[in-house]
Amino acid sequence: MQSPTELRNPRTHDIDRLSALEVLRLLNAEDRIPADAVAAVLPELAQVVEETTRRLRAGGRLHYFGAGTSGRIAVMDAAELIPTFSLPPDIVVAHHAGGAGALTLPTEGAEDSEAAGALEAAVVGAGDVALGIAASGRTPYVGGALRAARANGAFTALLSSNPAAGLAGAAHVHLCVDTGPEAIAGSTRLKAATAQKLVLNSLSTAVMVGLGHTYSNLMVDVAASNEKLRGRLLTILVEATGLNQKRCADALAAADGELKTALVTLLTDWRPEQARDALAASHGHVRAALAGVGHRPANLAV
């Protein structure tokens, strides 16, 4: 049975007869569909977020498995968590069929090996989460990975755009983001890929929030690896506290450049070592570290 993404889209039958602007309008209209499709699976996605947060908090890892565009999107999501949240690179791991070389030089046949997927998933442990990403819901590489990960005791999920995905039974949760026929039949780099990007962004961001990598909507674990980001540390402190730049800069220096430590000292009357202890006890959650503290600056912004 064909995946919906492989069917011909009746709205784009005449796309090759149109002007450039008309083609773009058609594509733009199709691009409005993924967000609503993602909204339809939010309850299931919340289940995956909660399980992933619980397992990562206990020392587990999140593994993505995908081929082609799906794998590339997974690699991008995992990579961007490292600077944004100072996440160690072995916590969210993206496995791409064909390896690193297939990221820039497509190796389409790599997705046909179920054994390769199972081999990649050998590193997945009982405390981990494995998310397979396949628009068609039947990619052998992804199937092999999901089955092996589940056999190892991991929590598994499948992200597809096919309500009748053949691999749904290999996962505890099927995130079916039904984006329908593509503007160009079978070209899942379009709507299906957009939906995958939205789901992975939402999943990883919600997990990072749950693990305490934000305070309000601020990135309090951002890795200050360049001048722009070093400046952002100060901006975050000013926005979070409402205090002036000099006060925030002094606190950051006293905290040896540790943003969370500086933030807690500014929101309390604690010394840096007290702030560090409170953060350690709260597993890095700023709000939890502040719980029960009676004193707050009068101009507290958040």
Image: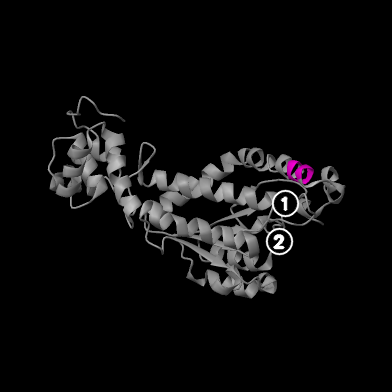
Pointer 2 or 1: first along the chain:
2
Locate residue 199 relative to residue 2 in the image: left or right.
left
Magenta segment includes 23: yes
For the image shown, how many numbered marks are present on the structure?
2
Residue shown at 54% from the left, 69% from the top: 121
Q: Magenta segment range? A: 21-25
Is the image coloured rainbow, by chain, by secondary structure, or in one colour? Answer: one colour
Q: In what element is the residue under mark 2?
A: loop
The residues tagged by marks 2 and 1 sit, at their Cα atoms, a distance apart of: 9 Å
Q: Which of 128 and 92 is in front in this view?
A: 92
Residue at mark 2: 138
Image coordinates of residue 136 in percent, x first then y, are 72, 57
Residue shown at 67% from the left, 55% from the top? 168
Q: Do the residues labelled 2 and 1 touch (CB within 8 Å)?
A: yes
Determine the residue located farthest toward the top in the rendered image.
298
Q: For label 1, count other residues whose C-alpha is less than 10 Å away and answer few (under 14), some (14-19) or many (20+).
A: many
**Relative to 215, 273 lies left or right:** left
Secondary structure of the residue carrying numbered label 1: loop
> Most prominent secondary structure in the magenta stretch?
helix
Residue picked out by circle 1: 162
Q: Visible in this render: residue 222?
A: no
Q: Nearer the viewer, residue 105 or 74?
A: 105
Name the image quarter holding residue 188: bottom right
Is the residue 97 above or below the residue 282 in the image?
below
Query: Residue 109, percent across and down?
Result: 70, 73
Q: Which amino acid does label 1 sit on?
A: Asn
In which quadrant will I find the C terminus?
top left
